[in-house]
Amino acid sequence: MIEKIKKKIHIFHNIFIKHKYLLNKDSYSMDGEDIFINEFFRKKKNGFYIDVGCYHPIHRNNTFLLHKKGWHGINIDIHQFSIDLFNYLRPNDFNFNYAISNKDEIIDMYYQKKLSQISTIEKFQANKVFQGNIKKSKIKSFKLDSILKMINLKNLKIDLLDIDVEGADLKVLEGFSLVKFKPELICVEIHEKEITKSAIFKYLISFGYELVWSGVFSHIFRSKA
């Protein structure tokens, strides 16, 4: 009982106090991604998003502006507390505590705290960005296609696919049927300095996407179909 109360207090603090849920902002993204996305979909009131590596329902989130105007979707993160926050603030969404990759398997995840943007399933990424002790645990990993089979929504139209999984972004795309679902926009992190030479850029271009917006790390691609 005490643990449940502590958990509710932690959720309340993280949403209403720390990140000021009641204070409206023009942007909730790290680099203004949501401004471009919201403008692109300005006439669409009831769209569907998939947010892989969703982290937090407000803070540095690319889908909150869409959620506020009636959109819903799927939110996935490797941290249970992230999903606790989404279950509280977006209870009508599908919220999953899994890793997403190009295989269905049990894998290692690397982290330093229970809520973090830089946790990862890629050891090379953890070694690169973490300072000090790296914690490791096991987590279920699924292809994004497998998640979509789980929820089994008929006539699903995906408007936005947002991916931020710290080094495993290409694996997420490889486990997703781009030809079948063809999201209008894909927002994904690319860490290479020369974007057009990156594996992710080449992969998306090969499926008929074009780069339409770039930030520091996030890049947005539009389907040309």
Image (cartoon, grey):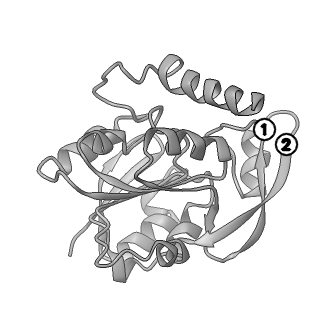
Q: Quadrant of the C terminus?
A: bottom left
Element at label 2: loop
Do residues under tags 1 and 2 come within 8 Å of each other at their CB atoms? Answer: yes
**For the point 50% across and 39% down, which residue is it?**
88
Q: Quadrant of residue 135?
A: top right
Q: Amino acid at mark 1?
A: Gln
Q: CA distance from mark 1 to mark 2?
A: 6 Å
Q: Quadrant of residue 108?
A: bottom right
The image shows residue 60 at horizontal and vertical percentages of: 47, 35
Q: Which of disc 2 and disc 1 is earlier in sequence?
A: 1
Q: Which residue, given by chain and number where applicable, does mark 2 sit on?
A: 134
The image shows residue 1 at horizontal and vertical percentages of: 75, 32
Pick the front one: 167 or 81: 81
Residue 66 is left or right of residue 199, and the answer is left
Residue 27 is left or right of residue 149, and the answer is left
* Numbered tag placed on residue 133 in the rendering: none
As drawn, the residue found furthest toward the bottom would be 180
Q: Amino acid at mark 2?
A: Ile
Q: Quadrant of residue 112?
A: top right
Residue 52 is left or right of residue 104, and the answer is left
Element at label 1: loop
In the rendered view, tell whether residue 4 sits above or below residue 204. Answer: above
As drawn, the residue found furthest toward the front would be 1
The image shows residue 214 at horizontal and vertical percentages of: 36, 46
In the rendered view, tell whether residue 175 sits above or below residue 25. Answer: below
In the rendered view, tell whether residue 24 sits above or below residue 62. Answer: above
* Numbered tag placed on residue 112 in the rendering: 1
The image shows residue 116 at horizontal and vertical percentages of: 65, 38
